Image: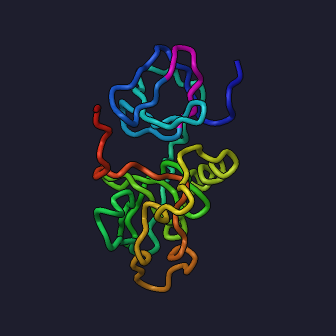
Amino acid sequence: MNVPQLPCGKALYSYEGKEPGDLKFNKGDIIILRRKVDENWYHGELNGSHGFLPASYIQCIKPLSQTPPQGKALYDFEVKDKDQDKDCLTFTKDEILTVIRRVDDNWAEGMLGDKIGIFPILYVELNEPAKQLMELDKLSPVPGPSTEPGSPAGPCSGPGPALNGNGPQAASTAEPTARKTPRSGIPSRRSA
């Protein structure tokens, strides 16, 4: 059995997933544990797929660090167009975010309260577990649909986030490219 050096668990049962965003796996799979959501759920990875899984379905082989991957906001991060930029996670200075994964060189996915979205990495001071997570995702890029050439620049498009104070200049021009989620206004295919 090839056990990764990362926190991981062995699937005791197969899981088909109940909702979009759940991780599907088979009994016996070794799942990398990214973070503990609460007492009942983990966020994990299997064969490049990320998703939520019930804690009761796995036997922990290597436990997660007791300190969750987190970051403290160094600046306010706001978006101009709430509809267009609904994939972004907005926050104010000094708020603490839970870090889920690295999206690309400039962006990470995180959670604040019950909101999940992407944010510029340079806007957040990461703790040690979050830095390790960012390095890990840098080594094994998270596969996902990339932005097509010629399509609008990433999910947080807009003139740039609002900054209070002297924030990093690179982040205001960086656009995420690794994650493009479908927009709700796209018409579905109709049968003829």
- The N terminus, quarter of image: top right
Which of these two is toward me, 60 or 134? Answer: 134
- Please provide the residue range marked out in magenta: 25-33
Q: Where is residue 36 in the image (x, y as percent from the top left)?
A: 44, 38
Residue at the image point whose x is 55% and y is 78% from the top: 168
- Give the answer, above or below, for where 67 lies relative to 80: above
How many numbered circles does the render carry? 0
Occupied quadrant, residue 160:
bottom left
86 on left or right of 73: left
Residue at the image point whose x is 49% and y is 14% from the top: 12
Residue at the image point whose x is 39% and y is 61% from the top: 88
- Give the answer, above or below, for where 32 lies relative to 164: above
Q: Position of residue 65 (x, y in %)?
A: 55, 41
- The C terminus, quarter of image: top left
Which of these two is toward me, 155 or 5? Answer: 155
Is 173 included in the stretch rendered in magenta? Answer: no
Q: Position of residue 76 (x, y in %)?
A: 39, 74
100 on left or right of 104: left
